Image: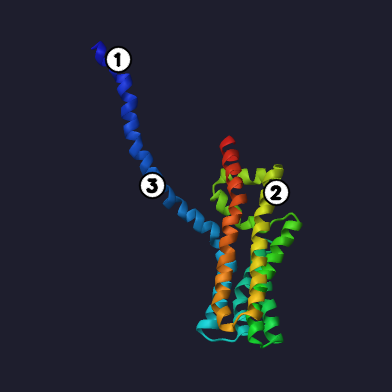
Amino acid sequence: MAATQTQNPETAPMSGHRDQAPADQALAGRAPADRRPDVVASLRPLLIDVGIPLGTYYLLRDAFGLSLWLSLALSSIGPAVRSVAGLVKERKLNLLAVLMLAVNLAGIVVSFLTGDPRAMIAKDSVVSSVIAFAILGSVMLRRPLMSAGLKPYMTRGKAERIAAWDRLSTASARFRRLELAFSTIWGLALLAECAARLVGAYTLPVATMVWLGTVLTLGSIGVAIVAGGAAAGPIQKMIDAEAAAS
């Protein structure tokens, strides 16, 4: 009896460990799926305010064969409605919607001023340049525009992580520098894409630039995502530590 009693304390932890391992593995296996809705929810504002207007523009222009200015005008309706709704409902500007509206209006002006196919290709750089200058301008004003999209992704809608972001953004100079660095990286990447598109529009064959323009856009976004990790990584670690300490 005594021997049996002395063995139980030793075997119990081992048994618990064996029982816990499958549970931990199951939780680990579910973690990516559990986080997927958070990622989708965090990217929804970017999709609505930027992705849908851009997709509408290319669909109307390339699939339905509408003129450039009409495609831009029709794709401007969504951002315009979103901007007005934000002012009426929340009494603040929806910056991404206003930005896309400005981009579309600038494209309409350019389309009226010229019918040169090279100029029309170069016109697409208006999208990158307006967004790039807006982002870099927000950095100069110390109100980094890209934080609006980064914050939901980093906090995943969890109250303790949102509170941690807010505290760090207010009290931590390093956190603020990382926010500014993240927006700066995106602004410079999009500005580089704009410059490359402009050079290509007037030095390469038009047929080449038709497909190369899309490659440049996707490439600049890829570079921004990879390079932006230099700032996003430390931001995430600071949020993790702050949320755990609270």
Identify whether 225 is placed above or below 238.
Answer: below
Residue situated in front as seen by the camera: 227 or 35: 227
The circle on residue 29 is 3
Q: Earlier in the sequence, mark 2 or mark 3?
A: 3
Q: Inspect this view and state whether residue 125 appears.
A: yes
The quadrant holding residue 78 is bottom right
- Nearer the observer: mark 1 or 2; the answer is 2
Residue indicated by mark 1: 6
What kind of element bears circle 3? helix
- Residue 46: where, in percent of width, then height? 58, 63
Dot 1 surroundings within 10 Å: few (below 14), some, or many (20 or more)? few
Residue 92 visible within the image: no
Under mark 1, the amino acid is Thr
Q: Amino acid at mark 2?
A: Arg
1 or 3: tag closer to the N-terminus: 1
The spot of residue 169 in percent (x, y) is: 68, 46
Which circle marks residue 171 in the picture? none
- Tell whether 121 sits left or right of 139: left
